[in-house]
Amino acid sequence: MKGGVFAVARNLFDHEIFADEPFTEREAWIWIVKEAAWKATRVRVGKHLVDLERGQCAFTTRFMATKFRWSEAKVRRFLNKLKTDAMLTVDTTQQVTRLTVCNYNDYQKVSLPRDAETDAKTGEAPTQKRRKEENRENIENNNTPSGAQAPHIDFSNPTDAQVYAFGKFVLGRSAGGVITNLLKKCEGDLAYAAHWLSEAQHKETPMEWVQGVIRSAEMLPYRGVIGAPKPPVDFKTREEREHEARVKEYMRGVL
């Protein structure tokens, strides 16, 4: 592709302002580039562990169909089109489809704003090296590092900082907006939000599952996501929880 590149926030696809609607082919391609690993890593796809090199991602066609709001047949046709145009290579097994973005490094030639005047005066190589590392850290490293330890959280009485730290560990570093929406859904109850994040930690697609929890306020499950809550979801408002607590306290006194 010609014309240069530009940075796109990874959480663009999860922003609540945009309608939940089928992807265009262009959006699907951007999503694939966004999902590609920026360094060698290992990911879980369903029950399988898959090793990825830089520029690779792996999903089932069913998952991509759900994400794009397409049929699986349309996903396969789209991948074949990209393969024919040498935009990616496709390695398909019975369990997983591994995608390798061709010329991945070209899509990652993105720099953050820099102080050109200062650089012109100093011309120091260490400054350029530091900026290069900061660019890579800010632009590419948005996922929880493999093998990272979960941050401490007191699930009975967590702090705001603990909920956000744990939420970003489970959902990814760019999940701040989703965590905020979850807290709104939980009416500011930090312990209740922590409970749902803990549940999400054990799901195949934690981000989509949490979004399903948030959307359940409208009695609408996150469409097509395996494991997402279905109405009537076991999610109670603060008023309902307080009422249940009062009933339990009363019953203990009676009995």
Image (tube, rainbow, N blue to C red):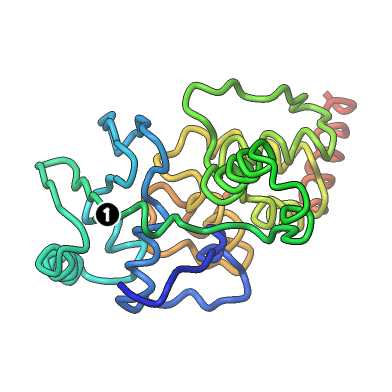
Looking at the picture, how far across and down is residue 241, in whole percent?
78, 45
Badge 1 density bin: few <14, some 14–19, many ≥20, Cα 10 Å: many
User: Which residue is pictured at 14% across the width and 71% down the height?
Assistant: 81
User: Which residue is pictured at 61% across the width and 39% down the height?
Assistant: 129
What residue does disc 1 label? 101
In the figure, is residue 26 to the left or right of 60? Answer: right
In the figure, is residue 207 to the left or right of 35? Answer: right
Quarter occupied by the C terminus: top right
Looking at the picture, how far across and down is residue 58, in whole percent?
27, 45
User: Which residue is pictured at 30% across the width and 36% down the height?
Assistant: 53
Query: Is any atom of residue 121 visible in this view?
Result: yes
The amino acid sitting under disc 1 is Val
What secondary structure is found at the residue carrying circle 1? strand
Looking at the picture, how far across and down is residue 147, in whole percent?
49, 21
User: Which residue is pictured at 68% across the width and 61% down the height?
Assistant: 113
Q: Quadrant of residue 43?
A: top left
